Image: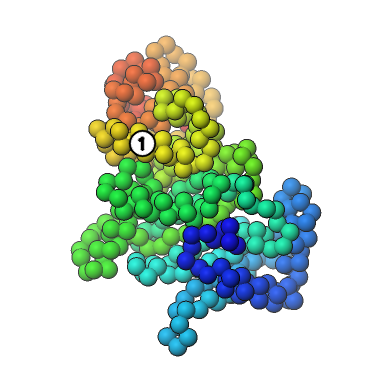
Amino acid sequence: MYHLMEGLSFKVTTCAEVLDAALTELNEQTGIPDKIVDWNARGASAKQPLSFPKRGRIIIDIEQCTSPEKGPLVLATVLERKNEKEKSPAAFFSMRSMLLDIPMRVEVPLRALIKGGKKLKGTYSVYLHALLSDDGEEFLYYGITKRSWSLRFNEHTKAAVQKNPRRLFPQKLNELIEARVAEIHGAEDENPKLSGIVSAICAIGLDERAAMDVEEYLVDKYSLSSKHRNGLNMIPGGYEGIRSLHRMSLVKEGPFLDTEAREEVLDKYLQEHPQLGIPKPGVAEKWNDPAYAEAVICARENRLSADQVREIRYLAALGIGVDQITEQTGALNTGQVRRVIEGGTYTRIH
């Protein structure tokens, strides 16, 4: 718990006590905690996924709140949600932001907090930050780190309150926070407002290869800004993200494994090139492209290759100008690049 909750405002020892009491009662009623201990001892997910047939998802919601009579309290509630797609048991750490008056929640795999789990120090975690707005939208950002994921979120928050943040995640967080603060102070603001934050640890205790593969999959499926309207990842995840930085000539050497290491490269580049403008999510449309389309569309003379099309979209998602994209990708002319960015051509290339 100390490893996974570093940087949070929760008192870890108090949370551990209420969690232990909830687990004891749950074990008496269902035996599920003992089964998780046994699952951990047998090598965890290397053997089989953690789930309990005919049971809903088990969630222990640990809430930090304030009572007028008793002051600060930490309460644990055991929930069973039968309609959730996700089946693995989890611990939720819930609170309300005193500054913004919005709900905030951290989701942690329950197996990581129960006896028998692997040591986490020196391993990678894959995390998700979801920003909720009052118009029903949800903005997603995935990352990996060897450090505490919550410390990384604090760094995103600091970047968000700086003037004119350049990257998409702090930029969107800044927009939503400013609108929420204006609402709290009674100012008229028609922009969407931050209504909640959910952070989830999607995978823990991973080696480098596994973490990079998981991040690449999740970013591509849910949060790559050039593919998903509400995605806040500016480059692909995992090793593909590193390859993208190399293709863009933003890096020449270095592993850049953690997401924050890759983002530091983007930060530096965007700060050094203010003329590029503020990058926006969803530069390209969503593409549903059968594999044969690439061969048909790209095979003719003077046509862009599928890799060139993808690179143009990646560079455009970073806010890089058309002239530089044309030169860097080897496109015929700026008009060819502009039509790709605007969605007028190559829309079937994924």
Residue drawn at 70 percent across, 53 percent down: 118
Residue 293 sits above or below residue 207 on the image: above
**Looking at the rendering, which quadrant does residue 181 occupy?**
bottom left
Measured as percent of width and height from the top left, residue 194 is found at: 35, 60
Q: Quadrant of the N terminus?
A: bottom right
Residue drawn at 52 percent across, 72 percent down: 63
Measured as percent of width and height from the top left, residue 22 is found at: 65, 75
Q: Is residue 185 left or right of residue 340?
A: left
Measured as percent of width and height from the top left, residue 220 is found at: 51, 39
**Looking at the rendering, which quadrant does residue 212 occupy?**
top right
Q: Is residue 20 left or right of residue 47?
A: left
Measured as percent of width and height from the top left, residue 309 is found at: 42, 25
Residue drawn at 45 percent across, 48 percent down: 141
Q: Is residue 156 left or right of residue 295?
A: left
Q: Is residue 65 left or right of residue 32?
A: left
Q: Is residue 289 visible?
A: no
Residue under label 1, please give it.
Answer: 268
Q: Is residue 304 visible?
A: yes
Q: Amino acid at mark 1?
A: Lys
Q: Nearer the viewer, residue 304 or 203?
A: 203
Q: How is the image coloured?
A: rainbow
**Looking at the rendering, which quadrant does residue 32 occupy?**
bottom right
Residue 300 sits above or below residue 108 on the image: above
Residue drawn at 41 percent across, 32 percent down: 314
Crowding near the residue tagged with mark 1, few <14, some 14–19, many ≥20 C-alpha atoms within 10 Å: few
